[in-house]
Image (cartoon, grey):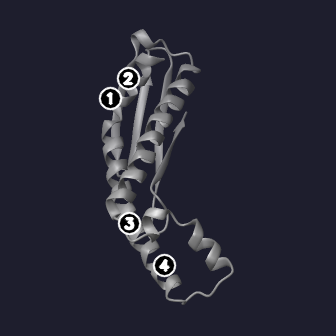
Amino acid sequence: MKRLVEILKRETESLRIQYINMTKEWAVSDFNLMREWAANYAAGRYGYGEASKKYYRLPHHVVNSYGVVDTHIKLLVKAAEKHYDESINKLAYRIEQKGLNIDKIYVQTSHIGVNINTILTDGEKTVKAFTIIASGDIQRPHYRYLIK
C-alpha cells in the first residue's frame, strides 16, 4: 500500500497545493470574523446566555490580545495537511480493496475546475477516483474522494 500512497501523493500534488491555498485564504476570513464577533461580544452587543457560551468556545489565540492571524493560519493548514494525508491513505486502502495489480498500474489525473479526477488501471481493472471540494464564506474548505 505504501507504493500506492506514493503514487497517489505524486498524482494529487496539485490538489494538495490548491487545498492548502484555499485553507489559508479561508483562515484569514475566519479569523477576522471571529475577532469581530469577539469584539462585539466584549462591547456588550450580544448579551449573555448562548452568546457567552460561544465566546468561551472561541480559540484563545483569537480572543486574546496576542492573537495574530498567522497562528490561526498555521493551525488550519496543519489540520488541512493532516486531512490530505488521511484522505490519501483512505483512498489507497479503498483502491487496494478493488484488487488492482499495483506493479502494472497506470495512473492518469486531470483537473476539472477545483476538482480532480484520477483514473487508475492495471490493464484489467479500472478505478475512477474523483474529489468533491466545497467551501464558502462560512464553510471551511473541505473535500472527499469518491471512487467508482
The mark nearer the N terminus, 4 or 1, is 1
| Residue 129 located left or right of residue 68 | right
116 vs 12, nearest the viewer: 12
| Residue 145 located left or right of residue 9 | right
Are the two marked residues, 4 and 2, in contact with CB atoms closer than 8 angstroms?
A: no
Q: Give the Cα separation between the discs numbered 4 and 1.
A: 41 Å
Q: Mark 2 — residue?
A: 6
Circle 1 residues within 10 Å: few <14, some 14–19, many ≥20: few
Badge number at residue 37? 4
Are the two marked residues, 2 and 1, in contact with CB atoms closer than 8 angstroms?
A: yes
Residue 93 place in picture, x, y as percent: 55, 24
Residue type indicated by callout 1: Arg
Are the two marked residues, 3 and 1, in contact with CB atoms closer than 8 angstroms?
A: no
Q: Is residue 137 visible?
A: no
Residue type indicated by callout 2: Glu
Badge number at residue 67? 3
Q: Is residue 24 visible?
A: yes
Q: Nearer the viewer, mark 3 or mark 1?
A: 3
Q: Mark 1 — residue?
A: 10
